[in-house]
Image (cartoon, rainbow, N blue to C red):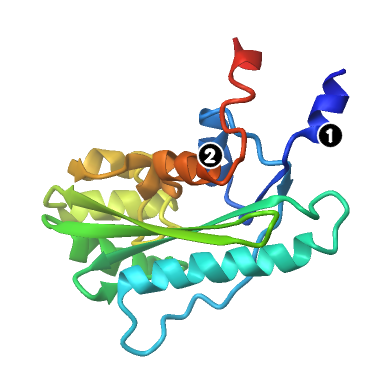
Amino acid sequence: MSSDKTSQRPRLVLASASPRRYALLQQIGIEPDVLIPADVDETPLKNELPRKLAQRLAAEKAKTAAGIAAKRPDASGAFILAADTVVAVGRRILPKCEFVDEAGDCLRLLSGRTHRVWTGLSIITPRGAERHRIVETRVRFKRLSGDEINAYLATGEWRGKAGGYAIQGLAGGFVINIIGSYPSVVGLPLYESMSMLAGEGFPTHQRWQDRI
């Protein structure tokens, strides 16, 4: 009986290998059926604004994953959900840090000031319709001492993170306030993701009773 229901339920592809995005969807009772990491060039275009970059990359990830999903029996005809998060100070786009020096530069830039985190969302429906949204969140950091920066860099938590920090980790202690969506800073705005999926007919609440 349950297998019949599962086979009839619309499937969802998360176009990401991020364990954070996967866990966030699970938090609101949405379990992706398939993970398809979308490998796209994330280099900003010349003079590209942060919000435009986040939206463009989310759309490119969704299209890339949709192309892969169409060739897979377990993912063909599924909803595709993709996201991309960009951290910026003004028009300056901060990198997803891979080297300790660039992470240190990011933290010194973010110290004592407010920055913006832009997350682009893109959905492709089983009918091929595309839906896009951009979510802006403002985050203010305390003024960081050299010892605090060095201690954080030593943890390695910054590696691969936009802006050189993970708000859901130790760097949460640097945050004075947030205006906007906390889960968006982690990597996936939950309200917007749920409302977009529900608006296109995905049963976002179907599994809630099973969790009781």
Q: State which quarter of the image contains the N terminus.
A: top right
Q: Position of residue 138 (x, y in %)?
A: 21, 52
Is 71 displayed left or right of 13 in the figure?
A: right
Residue 94 seen in this snapshot:
no
Is 113 displayed left or right of 132 in the figure?
A: left
Rendered image: mark on residue 198: 2
Q: Position of residue 90 (x, y in %)?
A: 19, 71
Dot 1 or dot 2, earlier in sequence: 1
For image coordinates 36% across by 90% down, the residue present is: 46
Q: Nearer the viewer, residue 128 or 42?
A: 128
Mark 2, residues whose alpha carbon is within 10 Å: few (<14), some, or many (≥20)? few
Residue 140 seen in this snapshot:
yes
**Which residue is farthest top?**
212
Q: Position of residue 37 (x, y in %)?
A: 66, 59
**Inter-mark Cα distance, 1 to 2:** 19 Å
Q: Tell me the kind of residue under disc 2.
A: Ala
Rendered image: mark on residue 7: 1
Q: Is residue 171 depicted above or below 97 in this figure?
A: above
For image coordinates 39% across by 66% down, the residue present is: 100
